[in-house]
Image: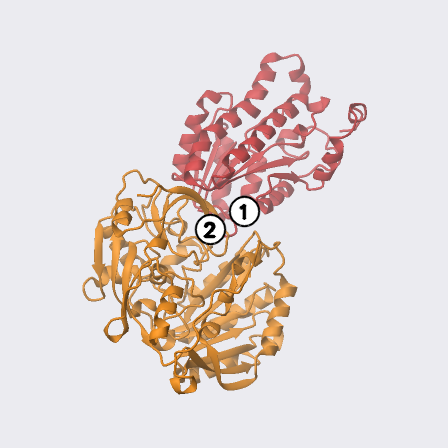
Chain colours: A orange, B red
Amino acid sequence: MAEPIPRRLSGWGRTQSVRAEVVAPTTAAEVASWLSDPKIHGGVIARGLGRSYGDPAQVAGGLVLDLVHLNHLGPIGEGGSITVGGGASLDALISSVLPKGYFTPVSPGTRQVSIGGAIAADIHGKNHHREGSFCSHVTSMTLATPTGIMTVSPTSNPELFWATAGGMGLTGVVLEATISLLEVPSGLVTVDTDRFEDLDALMAEMVGGDDRYRYSVAWVDCMAPGARLGRSVLTRGDHAPSGLTDGSVGPLPKPAKLAVPFQAPSGLLNRASITAFNEAFYRRAPKHKVGELQRLSSFFHPLDGVANWNLLYGNRGFLQYQFVVPDHAAETVRLVIDHLSGAKIPGFLAVLKRFGPGDPGPLSFPMAGWTLAIDVPIGPPSLPRLLDRLDDLVAEAGGRIYLAKDARLRPELVEVMYPELDRFRKVKAEVDPNGVLTSDLARRLNLVEGTR
Amino acid sequence: MRDAFGQPQRIVVLGGTSELALAVLHAMALDRVQCIVLAGRNEDALARAQAALLGAGAAAVQIVHLEATAPERASEVIAACVEAAGGQVDLVLVAVGMLGSQGDFDDDPAATAEAITVNLTWPAAALAALRPRLVAQGYGRVVVFSSVAGVRVRRANATYGATKAGLDGFALGYAESVRDAGVVVQVVRPGFVATKMTTGLTPPPMSTTPEVVAKIVVEAMAGTDLVVYAPRVLRPVFSIFKLLPQAVWRKLPG
């Protein structure tokens, strides 16, 4: 068994660097033995590819299980079912199944996400309004918990299965999962693009037209003042029929061609540079375009073309603010954008998307309604209090913050935003009575009472 | 745990009646703090500080007795503080200290020894007791209150300046020793601050207030600067002061 080595870890936003012991187990038995090791005092958490923005995949002073070796990809079975290791990346999965005419049922904004991470955050993609989040496509998962290895499905053990969906890794380490792939006729997407001068027009079109598309997402400029507030670009599409291509599934995603070689000075991404980017993005988008063929990678994962883009934010790092509010609270979306614009917070284009109904996971983020996500650099002194104010608006509207993106929520708001938190805690206490599985996120937000 | 803005949830203050330390706490987002532990000697002053912090929104304020003349018991004090904070500490403010009058130190070995014990020996012993805990928890921030009086010691407050010079040097070395463990140490060098400690003294040029120092410290705690001057102008000023010939230094006012 490999020996843990001390390492500095932080999330994708690079805001909360800590030291922990890190070990990369090679077998399920090894994972299980670390969870029952009496010498571990500081808590244990699994880590995939480190794309969570804040602190869920680290535990300061504890043991972090790097799942990189649990990356097996099984054969594709009947109906597109596949069993994959918890440490396998969506990138590897897509590269493996796309040539056979399959695609991941849910694709987030990056392929650099592990299966375990996709389950722990119950990730969503551009098709949530029609097809739900990742765990809705998981038929079974095998977890290493401090009370043993167990395989759970939505029917065999719905409580543990759904507590794990969005449970931020606190109910067990995902050793492997069986997921239902999506059969696709090609490796291309037909995309319709529309540009909107303001938020009302955009949201009306999304309400009226999203159901006609499998995929839909809008980019909103949250810095444009006054009448241009909420100007936006809506892209919607579906997999292109094979008739539109040469008959093969088409091009595979390619590794990043560009990389940010070193940490940029803090302040490179400031109000002026971000405003210029947002302006250019909006101007470049066509006013109305139908049926454009795009590669899967440029449609789903545009940022994967630049490795380590998080270094652009400099040593202070950045955070992503992502919330969801129910359909009837669409006005809250406008209020939030008003606040961001009014406070002159530099933020890249925000992503606006409609969610369909959520799944039963007590800590799963999506719920039917509107979700907005925006990246902001750490730095503006007014930012902490502004985000606190936005949290209040979101909570008052019956909405919530996405834990996979959070790095600063007030702990007392978690049970307001996730009213079934106690149901989660109950399941957690059953599989992990001594609170071995914990993380900096769990400690910061008191997600689990009595953790180490 | 701290959040993305460096905001701590659990704070230990060594020297819990220090006006500077309390000003720093009041300049922070106290409604975000779950627990503050004030370690000090003057029980009435501690109770007043506790009430003020609770009134300003802190969720819980605990009090631990600290006797800075007894460095051999520093580790007990640290153990009690960490326990009271709930086992983990996000931020430690080290603000134990006394100023004294140089005239009282000059010919008095006991008073001189006591000043060194309170200002240097006790804080250094406490930091040593804290070190394994900080290293084990893998993160944390320690803010040590030094003084410009230690940057270049002068006749008017030679003993105080010497104790701060010692503490400052200790803290700088300590910072390196815990750096790889993810622990950030910051050394604050205030100039003349108008507090009860300096009552009766004539404020020299560039003197400041606890509120100004607190604002600078809170801003600095969002980053990792090792040495923080308050007011900030003292950094260039003292980089020149350090180079002055002793004959000139001796004649400077204040």
| Three-letter amino acid code at the position of disc 1 | Met
Q: Is residue A215 above or below residue A51?
A: below
Chain assignment, label 2: A
Q: Do we see residue A225 in this rendering?
A: no
Residue A399 in the image: state x and y as whole percent. 40, 67
Chain assignment, label 1: B
**Which residue is at a point 30% across and 43% down the rendered structure image?**
A1
Q: Is residue A300 above or below residue B180?
A: below
Mark seen at residue B119:
none
Task: Measure how far apart labels 2 and 1 are at the Cα level.
Answer: 24 Å
Which residue has dot 1 on it? Answer: B28
Instruction: Please tell me which residue lies in front, B182 or A73.
Output: A73
Q: Do we see residue B158 in this rendering?
A: yes
Residue A101 in the image: state x and y as whole percent. 34, 76
User: Is label 2 in a helix, a strand or a loop?
Assistant: loop
User: Is label 1 in a helix, a strand or a loop?
Assistant: loop
Q: Is residue B127 above or below residue A393?
A: above
| Three-letter amino acid code at the position of disc 2 | Ser
Assign the C terminus of chain B to one quadrant of the image: top right
Which residue has dot 2 on it? Answer: A10
Residue A342 in the image: state x and y as whole percent. 60, 67
Q: How many marks?
A: 2
Instruction: Please tell me which residue lies in front, A127 or B122.
Output: A127
